[in-house]
Image (spheres, helix red, strand yellow):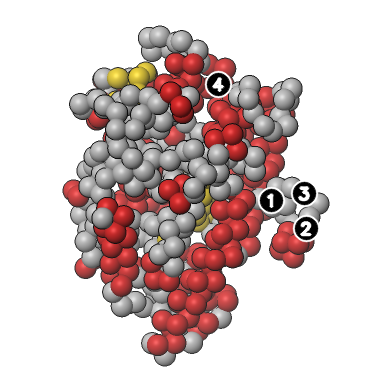
């Protein structure tokens, strides 16, 4: 029943007639998606979601790629996955109950979607019902346990690698979107959207492409003694550079060579997305992993201290990621990027809990499962009474309140320590 409610509340706003088509001017477009229907459609989400005022969508949609911090249920459909959140106490504060989100309520994607005025929850790609009009306001491809490296997360069971997530967008969702929008335009008598450049200019360029990944490459590979990759003995700077390189490789190559080259094992997700028309990117940093309950418990750290070697590693990655954002314009001249510094936002909450109304910074809100090595909640286990006072819900993932804070800072903060070089609200307006 809960799964059916999730589906209905996701798709109902999208069943309204499409409001507009591609405009005649070469430099502007009307809405070709279902954005105009948002004002008439109700929303449903967790935590404080119901308080958000309905508004016209600021973007056509959001397409999400990454790991469990942004996964909203794809791993539910992986029979061999050991990283799932489809049971209580996950979703204890989510009106639809456990949905695959690694939180007591919303994840950061849900909270950001509310701020952007999207009319419904972004559906998971793995759900076979996420096709046709259901995908017009975006699709979530993220998979808990995945990382930048293909083999990241394999020790946890079946995951969808980042490379495969983007292949799913290219091979399945992208043709589906083209067909949907061309059909709507033909029905309205406007055949201009049938042109490939119009589809990119009037729809894809007005969507956000969100990437939140990298943390598992350190937690499950570099710092994991049981890792199944080939990073053993690699120095931290070299390992970090390899991750960034895999994110940015072939940025300057022509599309034909990029698509067909087999000389490298990993391809650039940003370049692949840019090649098919993506223009607005939101890149999330890695959170302060050395402060998470799972790392602290593994090393028997007490009090408010964090394990700084892990924080140093992810801070190095975040620094390089920010530099990648700076250099992207020279390689992708039409792209605009916003870097959201989850590390600084969460670290400020950990360092100054009273300022943010937080009481517990080191322990997880739920009782941990031994079988998950202290990462996930115990099935049907007890939880803390006031989740708003906790930073972490389980051993790794933030609570609804923290996810909402990250979304608000990333969306509207004017500080470059939160959003750089612009925030998501300004990105959406471009």
Q: Residues within 10 Å of mark 1 (few under 14, many from 20)?
A: many
Q: Which residue is mark 2?
A: 261
First in sequence, mark 3 or 4: give its number: 3
Q: Which residue is mark 4?
A: 310
Whether label 3 touches label 4, CB < 8 Å: no
Q: Quadrant of the N terminus?
A: bottom left
Q: Which residue is pictured at 25% across the width and 49% down the height?
A: 96
Q: Does 322 sit left or right of 352 as displayed?
A: right
Q: Is residue 394 above or below residue 414?
A: above
Q: Residues within 10 Å of mark 3 (few under 14, many from 20)?
A: few
Q: Quadrant of the C terminus?
A: bottom left
Q: Which residue is mark 1?
A: 267
Q: Which residue is mark 3?
A: 264
Q: Does 257 sit left or right of 120 as displayed?
A: right
Report how far apart the C-alphas of labels 1 and 3 lie in the structure. Answer: 7 Å
Q: Which residue is pictured at 30% across the width and 37% down the height?
A: 88
First in sequence, mark 2 or 4: give its number: 2
Report how far apart the C-alphas of labels 3 and 4 lie in the structure. Answer: 29 Å
Whether label 2 touches label 1, CB < 8 Å: yes
Name the element at disc 2: loop
Q: Which residue is pictured at 21% across the width and 61% down the height?
A: 42
Q: Is residue 343 above or below residue 39?
A: above
Report how far apart the C-alphas of labels 3 and 2 lie in the structure. Answer: 7 Å
- In this view, the residue farthest toward the bottom is 189
Whether label 1 touches label 3, CB < 8 Å: yes
Report how far apart the C-alphas of labels 2 and 4 lie in the structure. Answer: 35 Å
Circle on res. 199: none
Q: Which residue is pictured at 63% across the width and 21% down the height?
A: 225
Image coords of residue 280 (percent x, y): 50, 56
Report how far apart the C-alphas of labels 4 and 1 lie in the structure. Answer: 26 Å
């Amino acid at each position: 029943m809960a799964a059916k409610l999730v589906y209905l509340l996701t798709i109902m706003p999208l069943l309204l007639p499409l409001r507009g088509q591609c405009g005649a001017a070469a430099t502007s477009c009307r809405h070709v998606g279902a954005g105009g229907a948002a004002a008439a459609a109700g929303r449903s989400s967790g935590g404080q979601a119901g308080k958000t005022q309905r508004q016209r969508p600021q973007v056509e949609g959001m397409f999400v790629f990454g790991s469990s911090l942004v996964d909203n249920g794809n791993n539910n459909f992986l029979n061999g996955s050991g990283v799932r959140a489809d049971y209580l106490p996950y979703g204890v504060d989510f009106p639809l109950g456990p949905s695959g989100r690694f939180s007591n309520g919303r994840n950061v994607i849900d909270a950001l979607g509310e701020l952007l005025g999207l009319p419904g929850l972004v559906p998971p790609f793995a759900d076979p019902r996420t096709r046709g009009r259901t995908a017009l306001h975006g699709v979530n491809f993220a998979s808990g346990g995945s990382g930048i490296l293909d083999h990241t997360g394999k020790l946890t069971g079946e995951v969808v690698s980042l490379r495969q997530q983007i292949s799913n967008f290219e091979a399945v969702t992208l043709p589906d979107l083209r067909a949907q929008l061309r059909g709507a335009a033909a029905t309205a008598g406007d055949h201009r959207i049938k042109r490939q450049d119009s589809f990119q200019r009037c729809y894809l360029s007005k969507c956000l492409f969100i990437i939140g990944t990298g943390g598992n490459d350190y937690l499950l590979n570099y710092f994991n003694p049981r890792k199944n990759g080939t990073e053993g003995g690699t120095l931290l700077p070299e390992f970090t550079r390899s991750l960034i390189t895999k994110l940015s490789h072939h940025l300057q190559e022509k599309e034909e060579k990029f698509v067909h080259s087999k000389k490298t094992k990993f391809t650039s997700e940003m370049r692949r997305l840019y090649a098919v028309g993506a223009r607005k990117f939101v890149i999330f940093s890695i959170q302060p992993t050395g402060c998470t309950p799972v790392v602290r418990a593994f090393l028997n750290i007490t009090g408010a201290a964090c394990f700084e070697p892990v924080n140093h590693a992810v801070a190095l990655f975040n620094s390089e990621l920010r530099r990648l954002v700076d250099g992207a314009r020279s390689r992708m001249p039409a792209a605009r990027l916003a870097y959201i510094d989850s590390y600084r936002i969460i670290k400020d909450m950990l360092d100054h809990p009273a300022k943010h109304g937080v009481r517990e910074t080191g322990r997880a809100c739920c009782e941990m499962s031994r079988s998950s090595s202290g990462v996930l909640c115990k099935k049907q286990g007890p939880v803390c009474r006031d989740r708003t006072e906790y930073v972490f819900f389980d051993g790794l993932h933030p609570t609804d309140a923290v996810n909402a804070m990250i979304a608000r800072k990333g969306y509207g903060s004017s500080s470059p320590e939160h959003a750089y070089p612009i925030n998501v609200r300004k990105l959406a307006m471009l």
